[in-house]
Image (tube, rainbow, N blue to C red):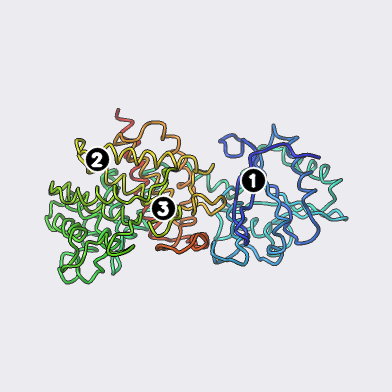
Amino acid sequence: MSVKKLDTHAIGVNSREEPIEAIVSGQYHSSDNIHRIALISGLSGGTNSQEIHREAIQTLLSYSQEISFIGSDFTEISSTLAEQHFPPEDGYFSDKNCPESRYIWRWLTMEAPDMVIEVENGPNLLIERFPNDAQDGSLLSALATHSSKAPGPIPGIRITCTAETVDSEISSILGEILNADPIMSGARSELEKRSSRTALQTAKVLAKTYGHKLEEPINYIQGVAISGRLRLKELDSTYQDPTDDIIELVEFLTNDADFKNNNISGPNMAAMCWANELFAATGDRRWRNLTIKAADCYQQGETGNPPLYMAKNADQGNPDFGCEDMFFISSMCGRAFEMTKDRKYLDSYVSFLLESNTQQDSGLFWHCRSAPFLWGRGNGFAALAFAEGLTFIPDNHPSRDTLISMHNKHMEGLSSLQQSTGMWTQLLDFPGTYQELSVTSMVGYALARGLRMGWLSEKFLPMLNKAWEGVNRRISENADLVDVCTGTGFQENRSDYLYREAEYGYDDRGGSMAIWFSTEMESLIRSRSNN
C-alpha cells in the first residue's frame, strides 16, 4: 500500500552523518485543540518494521480529520539503538557511537505529542502501556516517566503485531483516544505553559539565575546577562533595582591592575557591554571610562600589542574575521562612539564588518575565513554584530545603507532555514543537526532590534514570532535551557561542529543571549503598542 505524501524533514543525524527523516501532518504545529500522536517503529533491532510502519501511517491518515501526527521508522539504525538505555544521560550530541539516541529523545520530548505509539512486527499480538507496564529502560518507558532530560512525561503504547493486523490494532487504540477530548501530555502541558509567558515574564525568569556573577577572567557570556538585568530594570519598575549588586560585582575592573589581569582579548573585553548602561543608570563616570578603555583595546591593543581583532591570524597579521569578533568589536566600539562621538571607534567596527568577506551568496556567513562552515551560532554572532553596529551608526554615514543591505540579505538567507519550531540548527546547511538555543536567541534579538529601529521590514515579523515561540519553550521556570552549543572556536572540519556537545540545564552563554532576546522582544512589543 502506498503512503500518501506528507511533509518530510530531518530530525537528527545518524552515526554515518546522514539525516534521520520523519514525517509530519500539516496541523501538528498549529494551535488547534487536536489529538497529537507520534508513531515510531524499528527500535527493537529485530525483524524489519518498515512495512508495518507504512501500514500504520495509512491508518493514521484515515483519521486525519481528528488527529495530527509525526512519525519515523528507525529500522535502518535499529542495530545501534537496540542496546541503548533511555534517556541518554550525557554526550548530547557528541556521541559518535550512537548519536541517534540523543536526536530521537530530543525530537520526541520537544515535539511533545500527547501519546507515542510504537509498532513492532511480530507474530503474536502484545499490547504494552506505559507508564503502567514495567520500567524496562526502553524509550517508551523513559518517556512515560518524568526525566530531568524532558519537559514532562509522555504516555505511550507499544503494539507488537503483523502488518496485516496493525490497521485494526491502531484503529482500536484510536477509538479509545477519540472517545474523549484531547488530553495534553505532561510534556506538552509544560511547553504550552512556557509559551504563554510574555517576554517580560521570561526575562524575569532568566534574571533570577543569570547575570549574578562575573568570574575571572571575565567573558562576554556572563557580561551580556549583567546587561540584561539592567535592561530589565528599565522595562519593569517592579523589578528590584540591581544596580548596587552589579556595582559590587564589577567594581574590581576599575582598578588598572585587575583590568589588565583579565585576558585582554576580544571575548573578555566584550564582557563590559554593560558598562555604558551602568553609566546611564548611575552617572558615575568610572563606567563611561571603562567602556572607552575596553574599546581602546580594539584600537591599538594593550601596551603596544596589536588590536584585538588581529588576534586570530590568517596569514602575516591579517585578521581571520571570525563572526564572534564582529560582535565583540561592534558592541564595544559602538558604545564608545556613542559616548565620545570619536569616529575612530566607528571606523574600526564598520571597516571590520565591510572587510570580513565571509558572507556568502546565500546571505549566510562562514565562521571565519579559515573555517568555511555555516555554523549556527557563528551566524548568530554575525546577526548580533550588525544589529549592535547599526544601533550606533549615524543615519548619514556613507556605509550605513551597505551594512543594512548586508544585514537584510543575511536575514533573508536565515528565513529559509528556520525550522517549523522556530529554531535554527547547529549547522545551518546540514539537515537534522540539533536545534540550538543561542543562535535562535541571537537572530531573534537582531530581528526584534531591526524591526524596532526600522532597518528591517514587517515581512520579518512572522520569522521573529516563530523564533520567540521556539526559544520561550526551551526555557524552564527555573531557567534551565535546552541545547546550547558548548564553547566553540574555529574548527578544522564540518564534523567538529556536528559533534559539539549541547548543554542542557544551566548555561551562562545561552542564558545571556536569551535574556537579551527577551528584553529586546519586550521593547519591540511596547514600541508597537505606543504607535
**The C terminus is located in which quarter?**
top left
Q: Distance between the residues labelled 1 and 3?
A: 39 Å
**Residue drawn at x 32%, y 41% as measured from the top left:** 449
Q: Position of residue 35 (x, y in %)?
A: 66, 39
Quadrant position of residue 363: top left
The residue that label 2 is drawn on is 399
Secondary structure under badge 1?
A: loop
Which numbered disc covers residue 114?
1
Q: Do the residues labelled 3 and 2 touch (CB within 8 Å)?
A: no
- Quadrant for the N terminus, please: top right
**Closer to the N terminus: mark 1 or mark 2?**
1
Q: Closer to the N terminus: mark 1 or mark 3?
A: 1
Q: Is residue 70 depicted above or below 123 in this figure? A: above
The amino acid marked with disc number 1 is Asp
* Quadrant of the rendered image containing residue 222: bottom left
Q: Indicate the position of residue 107 as horizontal and vertical percent values.
A: 59, 52
Residue where numbered disc 3 is placed? 366
Disc on the earlier residue, 3 or 2:
3
Q: State which mark lies toward you, 1 or 2.
A: 2
| Quadrant in the rendering for residue 36 | top right
| Image side of residue 483 versus residue 314, left or right | right
Q: Is mark 2 on a helix, strand or loop?
A: loop
Q: Callout 3 environment at 10 Å: few (<14), some (14 to 19), or many (20+)?
A: many
| Mark-to-mark CA distance, 3 and 2 | 22 Å
323 is higher (above) or lower (below) than 260: above
